[in-house]
Amino acid sequence: MNDAKKEVYDKVYGSKEISYEPRHGVIAFLYRKLLKFEINRYQVAYALLPSGKERLLDVGCGDGHFLFLAKNKFKDCYGVDVSSLRITRAKEKSKERLDRDSFHLYEGDVDEGLPFDNSFFDAVSCIAVLEHVFNPPNVVEEIYRLLKPNGVFIVEVPNIAWIPCRIQLLFGKLPVTGGVYLGVDWEHLHNFTKATLCQLLTKKGFKIKDISCSGIFAEYRKWWSSALGGDLVVKSARRE
């Protein structure tokens, strides 16, 4: 990864900590009241993972939050992130755990390929990452290479076809699915709908197993996730 690209990713993503809650206003007040009905994206992805497997890879692992959550389902958990700052934090957190030797954390750019053997992993997770990479089709191909036949791929992305986004477009406004500056989402390089995400996965050799979403009342909203889901959480499996 070239230095200029690394600097951009560290600046944009390296300083971030996980946060689920809006900070101000009426929306934040309502969110706090309904928080007990929320299932966040990591909980949804965790529920879709298989159990009793050898190796999980979390692409874009950040500070290691999902890896630490998923550990009891896998013998070894691998994480890779483009931000050296976040990998450093993940390593520091892993050292505090009794099972620290089960975590393997690397700085790397999935856009440029990862240093693992073919069919090395039983499962790969990619949460809030695919919208940030330069070339999603190449990334999905790389994940296909890394997975064992029938290995599970869990991917989560924002849903640009969510009803509030459609309403924004109707009134001539750009939908926002990530960080905002001057009213525009500058962080996300790509947008996805349920149809486009599933088409990408099937084109690259995956079978769709489950489609869900996260958020408040997600169990009900997932039945029409293409319109009611603020995000899409898709479980797929590599075809043999």
Image (cartoon, rainbow, N blue to C red):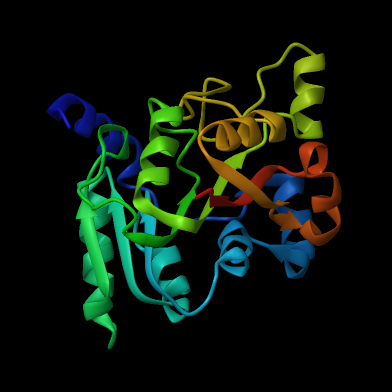
Residue 30 percent coordinates (x, y): 79, 55
Residue 25 in sight in this render: yes
Above or below residue 65? Residue 58 is: above
Residue 154 is situated, as x and y percent measured from the top left of the image, at 54, 53
Q: Report how many numbered discs are placed on residues in the image.
A: 0
Instruction: Depth check: give the residue in front, 151 or 170.
Output: 151
- Spot the residue most to the top: 172
Answer above or below: position of 216 versus 232.
Answer: below
x then y, percent, for residue 226: 78, 38
Q: Residue at x 62, y 69 (%)?
A: 47
Question: Is residue 96 in view?
Answer: no
The residue sitting at 57% across, 47% down in the picture is 156
Residue plotted at (69% across, 55% down) = 214
Q: Quadrant of residue 171?
A: top right
Q: Is residue 142 left or right of residue 22?
A: left
Residue 5 shown left or right of residue 70 in the figure: left
Q: Quadrant of residue 110?
A: top left
Looking at the picture, tell me which residue is in the foreground, 130 or 181. Answer: 130
